[in-house]
Image (spheres, rainbow, N blue to C red):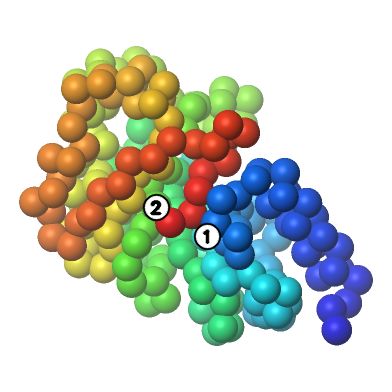
C-alpha cells in the first residue's frame, strides 16, 4: 500500500494526465523540476497500471544544463519494472556538442535507444537567457538543430526524436528546414510531431 506522500503525488499525476488527454494510456511525460522520485515511487506508478515515464535530463530553465533531479529519477526508475525514457530541452546558446556530450556522460549507463529532443518556445521569466532562438537567422538555427541531432545519433547510443510545434519550427527554422537531413547519422531515426492542444508533448 502506498503511503500518503506517494498517494498524493500519484493523484496529482493522474489528474494531470487526465487533463492532458494523453492518447497513449499508461504513459506519462513530465519533468522532475523539484523532486526526483524514488524507486519506491516509480514502483507505485507501475503497480497502478502505468507502463512508461519520460524524464527531463537537460533543461532550459535558469541555469540551463543537466537536470540533476531528472537524472536521479532516471537512475531510480532503471531499477524498477516501469518502462522509461528521457528527453532534453535544447538550449540555442550552448554548443550543441557540449549539450549532447553532457547528456551522454550523464545517462548512457542507464539509457540506450530513443532520446526525445524537445524544442520549445523560450520563456524569458524562467529560462536561461542563452537559450532563446531569437537573434539568429532561420538558416543558422536550422544548421544548429541538424548538427545537434546528428551529434545525438553519432553517440551510437541514442536515436533522436524531435518534438516541437509547426509554429515554432516555421518561425525559428523555416518550413524549408529539412531535419531529415540527419538521416545519414549513425543509428538516427527522426520523428516530427505536433503538441497536443494544451501544449503537452506525447511520449513515443
Above or below, 97 against 9 in this view is above
- Residue 90: image quadrant is top left
Q: Circle 2 sits on which residue? A: 116
Please identify the quarter of the rendering in which residue 173 is found: top left
The residue under the point 56% across, 51% down is 23
3D distance between C-alphas at marks 1 and 2: 9 Å
Residue 54 image label: 1
Q: Which mark is residue 133?
A: none
| CB within 8 Å, label 1 to label 2 | yes
Relative placement, left or right, of 158 versus 2 is left
> Would residue 151 be found to the left or right of residue 63 on screen?
left
Q: Earlier in the sequence, mark 1 or mark 2?
A: 1
Residue at the spot 26% in from the left edge and 20% down from the top edge: 174
From the viewer's side, name the closer residue of 7 and 68. Answer: 7
- 79 vs 192: above or below: below
Give percent across and percent down for residue 193.
39, 40
Amino acid at each position: 500500500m502506498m503511503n500518503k506522500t506517494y498517494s498524493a503525488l500519484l493523484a496529482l499525476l493522474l489528474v494531470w494526465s487526465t487533463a492532458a488527454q494523453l492518447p497513449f494510456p499508461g504513459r506519462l511525460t513530465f519533468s522532475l523540476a523539484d523532486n526526483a522520485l524514488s524507486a519506491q515511487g516509480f514502483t507505485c506508478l507501475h503497480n497502478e497500471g502505468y507502463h512508461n515515464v519520460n524524464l527531463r535530463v537537460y533543461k532550459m530553465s535558469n541555469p540551463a544544463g543537466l537536470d540533476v533531479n531528472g537524472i536521479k529519477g532516471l537512475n531510480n526508475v532503471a531499477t524498477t519494472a516501469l518502462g522509461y525514457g528521457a528527453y532534453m530541452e535544447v538550449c540555442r546558446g550552448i554548443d550543441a556538442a557540449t549539450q549532447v556530450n553532457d547528456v551522454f556522460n550523464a545517462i548512457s549507463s542507464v539509457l540506450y535507444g530513443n532520446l526525445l529532443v524537445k524544442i520549445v518556445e523560450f520563456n524569458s521569466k524562467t529560462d536561461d537567457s542563452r537559450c532563446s532562438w531569437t537573434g539568429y537567422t532561420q538558416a543558422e538555427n536550422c544548421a544548429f538543430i541538424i548538427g545537434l541531432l546528428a551529434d545525438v545519433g553519432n553517440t551510437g547510443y541514442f536515436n533522436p526524436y524531435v518534438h516541437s510545434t509547426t509554429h515554432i519550427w516555421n518561425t525559428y527554422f523555416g518550413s524549408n528546414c529539412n531535419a531529415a537531413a540527419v538521416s545519414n547519422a549513425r543509428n538516427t531515426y527522426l520523428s516530427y510531431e505536433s503538441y497536443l492542444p494544451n501544449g503537452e508533448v506525447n511520449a513515443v
